[in-house]
């Protein structure tokens, strides 16, 4: 049944997604990033240091813990948990295979401008959030969308975003994460993916019913551990391949502007593919402009929106310029350099051997050994994807409450949780290509109302960033 449904829907979803990615997404993401970069006078450069200062030095920024909110660090950890997922491992692999090593360069470009975008998102999320008498917080893009646009149009845009994010992250996105966990664990340890799915369902359900406080407690512990674990492994591979590092960077730059030399086809086709793959996978990786992580930042115990905006920029930096870049360097330095199996390009029989789900395992396995490389990547995917499931479930839950929670909030949460659990299980039973296409499509759709609202609220963001003093 699942296979038949997938075969029928896959061509349609792929066609819609290709149009959205190639003709809408790139322009929206680059456009809003460039817009806010210049409107804020390069806030990602001028105030980059402030993010570290606000996290580690300004203790007065943090209020007492509350069951309905998070500390600034917990908000950042929850945001990073949503950002650092399969997009950094499987997504980067897919971008390199489809767009060549140069796709990583365009991911860097997207991320640099995206730091300005996510500053605006987090700032607006804190600025427009609603704090109840019991300390509960309602915040996220739906609230700054309705601030930007009043009346029926604003309500329509907010509802469209809420529905899109529930499908993109709460349901389809969790399918992607569960899919990557299930099949990587099956490949590394021989555990059937459906058994992994049952385990995920049980653990996730226990955390989901614990609310924000339990989720924040988990993410603030798991995110630093998983990041350090992956960084140590990645640096070990690069140390073993150190003589190929200059060639690796040269390939990234060269194939960013001459991708036809590695992926074939005409220059126009190749550059469009490299750029669109970088933009599409860059979005899925750092989520700047997508409207997901503002939900976490809206819950932060800060009084000044600017402070959380600076902290939010760290999320994009760590996600793309540290984790994703390290993963890309491992892949390119082992697979695409002169002694690598993909040195001549990704074509012919190689397309049946190396896929985006196993390319990273081959890359780490070339240094660690096939068995340990597969195990290492499987463990990383487990941590990355699991933490992302937790965050994305929260983001979807917030929007479910916005849509259906006015009269019966507990019922809305219970129904949403039950459906999301089913999607997590379903994700371990279907092929990753179909799951990725579905997720990409809904990711693209949720960008549209979010970016339109960001453009409309430029004045509020620039007023905040141009203040001389912050409390």
Image (cartoon, helix red, strand yellow):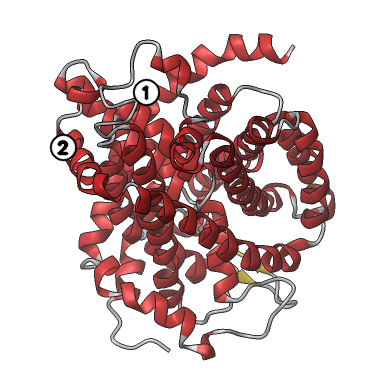
x and y percent of residue 167 in the render? Answer: 62, 36
Of residue 242 and residue 220, the one placed in the foreground of this image is: 242
Q: Nearer the viewer, mark 1 or mark 2?
A: 2
Specify the label residue 254 is tagged with: 2
Q: Secondary structure at mark 1?
A: helix
Of residue 348 and residue 312, the one placed in the foreground of this image is: 348
Residue at point 58%, 27% (across, down):
435
232 is higher (above) or lower (below) than 270: below
Residue at point 41%, 82% (across, down):
53
Quadrant placement of the N terminus: top right
371 is higher (above) or lower (below) than 208: above
Where residue 72 sits, quadrant-wise, is bottom right
Q: How far apart are the two marked residues, 1 and 2, measured between alpha carbons?
A: 27 Å
Residue at point 38%, 86% (across, down):
470
Residue at point 63%, 62% (across, down):
222
x and y percent of residue 48 in the render? Answer: 32, 72
Of residue 124 and residue 103, the one placed in the foreground of this image is: 103
Is any part of residue 70 visible from this angle?
yes
Mark 2, other Cα within 10 Å: few <14 / some 14–19 / many ≥20: some
Q: Is residue 23 left or right of residue 358?
A: left
Q: Is residue 303 left or right of residue 195?
A: left
Of residue 60 and residue 23, the one placed in the foreground of this image is: 60
Q: Secondary structure at mark 2?
A: helix
Specify the label residue 19 is tagged with: 1
Where residue 74 sits, quadrant-wise, is bottom right
Quadrant placement of the C terminus: bottom left
């Amino acid at each position: 049944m699942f296979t038949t449904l997938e075969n029928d829907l896959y061509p349609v979803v792929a066609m819609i997604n290709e149009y959205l990615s190639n003709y809408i997404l790139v322009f929206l993401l680059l456009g809003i990033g460039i817009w806010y970069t210049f409107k804020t006078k390069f806030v990602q450069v001028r105030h980059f240091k402030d993010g570290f200062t606000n996290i580690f030095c300004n203790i007065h920024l943090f209020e007492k813990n509350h069951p309905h909110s998070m500390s600034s660090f917990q908000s950042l950890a929850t945001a990073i948990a949503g950002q650092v997922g399969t997009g950094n491992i499987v997504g980067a692999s897919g971008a390199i295979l489809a767009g060549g090593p140069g796709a990583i360069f365009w991911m860097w470009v997207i991320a640099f401008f995206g730091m300005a975008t996510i500053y605006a998102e987090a700032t607006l999320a804190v600025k427009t959030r609603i704090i109840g008498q019991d300390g509960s917080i309602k915040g996220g893009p739906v609230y700054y969308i309705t601030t930007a646009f009043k009346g029926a149009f604003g309500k329509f845009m907010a509802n469209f975003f809420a529905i899109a994010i529930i499908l993109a992250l709460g349901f389809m996105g969790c399918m992607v994460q569960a899919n990557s966990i299930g099949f990587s664990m099956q490949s590394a340890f021989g555990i059937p993916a459906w058994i992994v799915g049952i385990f995920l369902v049980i653990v996730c359900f226990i955390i989901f019913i614990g609310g924000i406080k339990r989720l924040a407690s988990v993410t603030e512990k798991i995110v630093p551990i998983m990041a350090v674990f992956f960084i140590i492994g990645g640096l070990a591979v690069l140390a073993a391949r150190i003589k190929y590092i200059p060639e690796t960077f040269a390939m990234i730059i060269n194939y960013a502007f001459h991708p036809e030399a590695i992926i074939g086809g005409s220059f126009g086709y190749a550059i469009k593919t490299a750029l669109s793959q970088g933009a599409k996978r860059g979005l899925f990786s750092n989520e700047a402009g997508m409207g997901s992580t503002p939900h976490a930042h809206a819950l932060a115990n800060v009084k000044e929106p600017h402070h959380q905006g600076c902290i939010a920029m760290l999320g994009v930096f760590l996600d793309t310029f540290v984790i994703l870049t390290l993963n890309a360097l491992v892949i390119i330095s082992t697979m695409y350099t002169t002694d690598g199996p993909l040195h001549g390009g990704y074509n012919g029989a190689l397309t049946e051997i190396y896929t985006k789900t196993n390319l990273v395992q081959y890359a780490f396995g070339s240094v660690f050994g096939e068995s340990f490389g597969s195990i290492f990547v499987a463990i990383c995917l487990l941590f990355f994807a699991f933490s992302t499931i937790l965050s994305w479930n929260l983001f979807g839950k917030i929007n479910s409450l916005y849509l259906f929670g006015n009269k019966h909030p507990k019922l809305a949460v219970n129904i949403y949780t039950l459906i999301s659990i089913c999607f997590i299980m379903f994700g371990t039973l279907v092929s990753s290509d179909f799951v990725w296409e579905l997720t990409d499509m809904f990711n693209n759709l949720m960008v549209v109302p979010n970016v339109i609202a960001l453009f409309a609220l430029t004045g509020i963001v620039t007023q905040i960033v141009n203040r001389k003093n912050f409390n």
